[in-house]
Amino acid sequence: MTSDRPGDPTRALLKRLIARASVTPDDAGCCDILAAELAPLGFQAHAFDADGVRNLWLRRGTRAPLFVFAGHTDVVPPGPEARWSSPPFSPTERDGCLYGRGAADMKSGLAAMVTAVQRLLADGHEPAGSIAFLLTSDEEGPARFGTRHVMEQLRAMNVRPDYAIVGEASSVDKLGDRIMIGRRGSLNLQLTVDGRQGHVAYPHRVDNPIHRLSRALAALADERWDEGDRDFPPTSFQVSNVGGGTGANNVVPGSAWAQCNFRHSPASPAAEIRRRAEALIARHCADYDAEWQVSGDPFVTPRGRLSQAAAASIQTVTGLDPALSTAGGTSDARFIAPAGTQVIEIGPINASIHQIDEHVRLADLDPLARIYEGVLRRLLVEEPA
Ligand SMILES: [Zn+2]
């Protein structure tokens, strides 16, 4: 491969981005760098800044389908700079890698998306559809005024992306070995059980809430919520914290509590888990209070044109047959999927993200851009087979 050549435009652009200390939610001028690359290609910029967050929507063309590259310019704090082998915001090449905060998460994704589009349009072939970039500086932070906000604004403007690639570091051991096609949901439960306080020597005068809570938690832990499916493991329940008691060993307390979390697949929606869980709890607890909090809804992009185009492009560029996965934590794809958009994540190896000495393999940069370009060509240039 020729990816290591000094003139690699993805590498050059990535270095300019890493040199910006865009610690969340500070964009530090990254959006302007990307917009300046895209403006000469006919991309129209629309700012959706909100609450100190820089959001930029850049679109080229008005025709359907609408293909979106989505990504964040913000990075997590570097941590103690003295522990870095080279300064975190001075992009440094060493041992075949480029080091710097954001090198993998996810400035290499952003750089490769831009050079992919530059290359696609360089041959003068007009794509059969529109291409857009959805950029935000609030992914690593609260993520309240970033991609979610932009998707709300787009919906108000009746803009619905058909396809989206988020450039998060999705690969495990080799570039392209994994595509993320969805995520499990996360549902929190704060359960408080009331009983009747009293002396442990007089069991007929007490109603022990710890006993009731224990039985309820055991029932929740033993429940088979669903069987999982091809894309998701079975829904899981875990207790994370539990408490109760007065501190004295001869007193039954008046109440006890537990904090629990469900990681669930679309097969078991949050409302369904709630209904079933409360029925189990009510069997063991006469007097309880259940507080529920959805921290993320599950989603999956069904196998279709986008995942096929992505797998084919990865196969062509790397020779690998990517695994389609829903593992791991959240990403901004969760805010794009509800629009009905086919959304997946493709990016570099994620081993060093958020760590000291974050890096990306230099030899992966040009192939990543070619993977993105190949997806665009398959969806917007070549006729469907
Ligand atoms: Zn990221």
Image: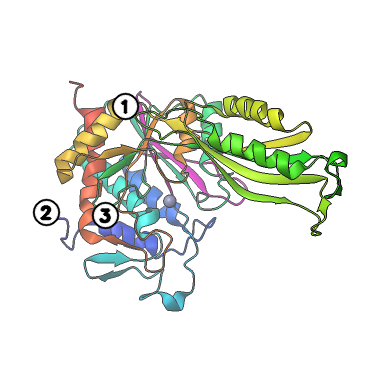
Q: Quadrant of the C terminus?
A: top left
Nearest the camera: 330 or 47?
330
Residue 355: x and y in percent read 41, 64
Nearest the camera: 298 or 335?
298
Residue 230: x and y in percent read 34, 29
Mark toward the viewer: 3 or 2: 2
Sequence-first tag of 3 and 1: 3
Q: Residue furthest bottom?
A: 82
- In this rendering, the answer to whether 361 lies above or below 185 is below
Q: Residue furthest top?
A: 385
- In this rendering, the answer to whether 366 lies above or below 124 is below
Q: Residue at x 54, y 31 (%)?
A: 223
Which quarter of the picture shows residue 291? top right
Q: Which mark is residue 1?
A: 2
Amino acid type shown at disc 1:
Arg
Name the residue carrying label 1.
303
Name the residue carrying label 3.
10
Label 3 C-beta lies within 8 Å of the nearest ligand 1 atom: no
Considering the numbered disc 1 on the image, is that residue within a helix, a strand or a loop? loop
- Distance of label 3 from label 1 (alpha carbons): 29 Å
Mark 3 and 1 residues: CB-CB less than 8 Å, in contact?
A: no
Mark 1 and 2 residues: CB-CB less than 8 Å, in contact?
A: no
Mark toward the viewer: 1 or 2: 1
Which quarter of the picture shows residue 66? top left
Q: Residues within 10 Å of mark 3 (few under 14, many from 20)?
A: many
Nearest the camera: 166 or 194?
194
